[in-house]
Amino acid sequence: MPEMPKAYEPGKAESRWYSFWLEKGYFTPRIDPVRKPFVIIMPPPNVTGELHVGHALTATVEDIMVRWHRMMGEPTLWLPGVDHAGIATQWVVEQRLLAEGTSRHALGREKFIERVWEWVSRCRGTIAQQHQRLGVSCDWSRERFTLDPGPCRAVRTTFVNLYRKGLIYRGERIINWCPRCQTALSDLEVQHKEMEGRLYYIRYPLVTQDGGQFITVATTRPETLLGDTAVAVNPGDGRLKHLVGKKAVLPVLKRVIPVIADEAVELSFGTGAVKITPAHDPVDFEVSQRQGLPLVNIFHPDATMNENAGPYQGMDRFQCRKAILADLEREGLLVKTEPHSHSVGHCDRCGTMVEPRVSPQWFVRIGPLAAKGIQAVVDGRITIVPERFTKVYLNWMENIRDWCISRQLWWGHRIPVWHCRKCGKETVSVDDPASCAHCGSGDIVQDSDVLDTWFSSGLWTHSTLGWPDDTEDMRYFYPTTVMETGYDILFFWVARMIMLGLENTGEAPFRWVYLHGLVRDEKGEKMSKVKGNVLNPIEAIGTYGADALRFALTTGSTPGNDTKISAQRLEAGRNFANKLWNAARFVIMSLEAGEVAPAVPLPVEDRWVISRLNRVADRVGQLMRDFQFGEAERQVYDFIWDEYCDWYIEVAKVRMRSGGPPPLPVLVRVLETSLRLLHPFMPFVTEELWQRLPREGRQPDSIVVAPYPACDEKELDTGAERVMGTIIEIVRSIRNIRAQFRIPLERWMEARIYAAEGQAELARHVPTIETLARTRPVSVFPGERREAPDKETLALVLPGVEVLLPLKGVVDLDVERKRLADEVAAAEKFAGSIRSRLDDDAFCSRAPAEVVEKEREKLISATERLERLRSLLAQLQ
RNA sequence: GGGCGGUUAGCUCAGUGGUUAGAGCGCUUGCUUCACACGCAAGAGGUCACUGGUUCAAGUCCAGUACUGCCCACCA
């Protein structure tokens, strides 16, 4: 074993042990038909660049679960992968082409796709490498990419099945269109932003015999009037309903359009009359469907005005608005404008203002799928953690609308539909067809659109395991156990996995959905490259170590809540790893010199630390089962630092120096168990230290596959906990006095301890108390205090114990009386509150017996201590 | 417009009905004590946002209020 430096050096340990784990193949589960596996399919990061700290959180939380289950002996599969991320990746590569002074159109579809593949292969490598730096224990032998042949076939199979069931259709519908990306977007891919705009009141002349009459509409988008095909009023509008059936003249274009009645019009907004632009507004589109109105598309795909825009043809939509407003003003048709704030859709990916537009697209008829997805959660086949997201999920599913799945992109899964040039019909097929299925013509051409990225992601739980084939993986690992991801993609991804998983396999794709929060900066703001507040996980690992990053991301956080990360938290993680390192260093160095025969019988502090260890193991197990990983981690932290390091090691030192019973076997045993408890959270430092500890021959050769500690009830020892508690109290109180009276460490104090019970145990700990409290000599007497305090002696009243400290020249009787009087007052208040509770019949009769009993015991000890405090105070008068 | 969070120590956050509310960081004081100054010891610091209710018992459950953040929604 190499030397142990004073500080833990994470870098070396991390690369060494990760390679070791890979070599040993621990992350590849062995299929064992008699055992139920634990399975997580990793949310595939997009191949758009490097991992960010959100990925690090995802990976850490999943690794905690996976390592825990693996240590519990379950066949554990964590399957990694990456997502082709159609629009996002295409955008990234387009930006790079732009920087090179070229474009995808200049390259052409085929060359462009080649360029994206080049980018992807580099990116995949980076992502895998970065995941490994974090210590993820996933099965790299099963890594998948959404465009791998298997997943591709899953996509096509799903499409074909849904198509044959009538659940996929193509139609001319209004969709969100990004003029920059030049593709349709689903409703989810549109970001709504509240914007300060204006409401324009425009007069449309009515066609009447005498002329000079108008109907005034209010609109935020005057330029779209070029596409108007009606003006609508509410059928119940007394002010305006006499106009229904009349004709209006569209300004500028002079097109004559009808005035119609439709329920969609609000009475209280604007003028009560609405211009209807069916091709460019979702509500207007629905009105047009109801009323049989024609559609007029006024935009090119890039949102410049097309031939239907008459004089404005060629302008972009913003120029057009200005021009139209000027023209309306000149014609006296612009009545007024007023400020108006409303929300405007923007492309989730590139931020361009979305243009609603009617165009032919492919849709999933989602209703029947959603109904099953709702049922699976309602009847408990799937449980969402934290629970509050259940309602969010159900609410969204209940109001879901058909999903537009076609994208006018080049990068992605081509839609498996071939159009026949001869008969015009569609051939839908998993394998590329040679001829039209209807007329047999060879003159067929594949649909040029690709599928929404989330269509393939939605199959991820089973496409990664071999579906649609009946593979061994599929049979054994499906359905999976936990889907762990951020709450921000509950709709995008989780809901669709549930629907498509149920549809394809008939089973819920996972038992649990665990949602984590977002990682924010120290000010609580979302991290973004623009703001420059991103924390690069790899840099953080370089500075603080992977375990420190994992600690900072997960400790003290709760499911579904956002977490903040800062240098301070990273430091806390690093400090903890270092603390553990040094505790182990002490144990290991002691082993080199020390004796390893166990003490018989075990001294009280040994039984105490073992008892506490078991309690922590018990509590941690419960918390892990409840997905409370942050709290579980904190429990282990507290035990190691406060109880093991600050007390047990210190007591052990005393024993080693004074030749007391050898503490080494317990020292080693508790450390070894603590390392196993901590391993899922901080895998590297625990493995590094575990490997350095002596092990009996039959243990596994890595902590990765060592058993996770469980509570052994036989080792719980409340008696030892009580005695050790008293010792800790005595030492603390004496140290307190020393600090309070500024007694230098060089000056030793005598201590006389009177113990009403447990005197024999305390007497055995005289050397411990002497060393830890810097007191000498310490004598322990049985029973009540038999000496009166004076101005030379200070008395401490503890539960069941009194400590007398002869302190010549430091005790000020007035100060001492005041101190005691304060203590008496506090003790009276405390005892009083318990007594009044016990005097309450309602409490005694209604509270559970053990709670009442606990209160009685508390009252007895509180009263007893109060009396001793009072008598002490009396003796000082 | 609807929904969901948050409000606990100076800061960032835990706290899963049981009564003297915790941690990390920061602060004060004292320590280079032979595992660790990335440390040790001692301490200060909280009407748990507010109002009402349920309960023997409320930081914890319920209702409302205020502030704050987020999500959803066809706000011409």
Image: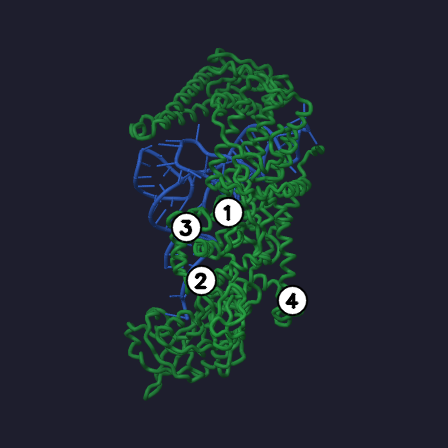
Chain colours: A green, B blue
The residue furthest right is A3
Mark 4–mark 1 CB contact (< 8 Å): no
Q: In the rendering, which numbered label is found on residue A477? A: 1
Residue at image point 50% right, 77% down: A422
Q: Position of residue A78 (x, y in %)?
A: 55, 46
The answer to whether residue A290 is left or right of residue A147 is left
Q: In the rendering, which numbered label is found on residue A390? A: 3
Q: CA distance from mark 3 to mark 4?
A: 43 Å
Mark 3–mark 4 CB contact (< 8 Å): no
Element carrying mark 2:
helix
Tell which circle, 3 or 2, labels the residue nearer the N-terminal end: 2
Q: In the rendering, which numbered label is found on residue A97? A: 4
Tell which circle, 4 or 1, labels the residue nearer the N-terminal end: 4
Residue A561 seen in the figure? no
Element carrying mark 1:
helix
Q: Quadrant of the N terminus of chain A?
A: top right
Label 1 CA crowd tier, 10 Å (few <14, some 14–19, many 20+): many
Do marks 1 and 3 share a chain? yes
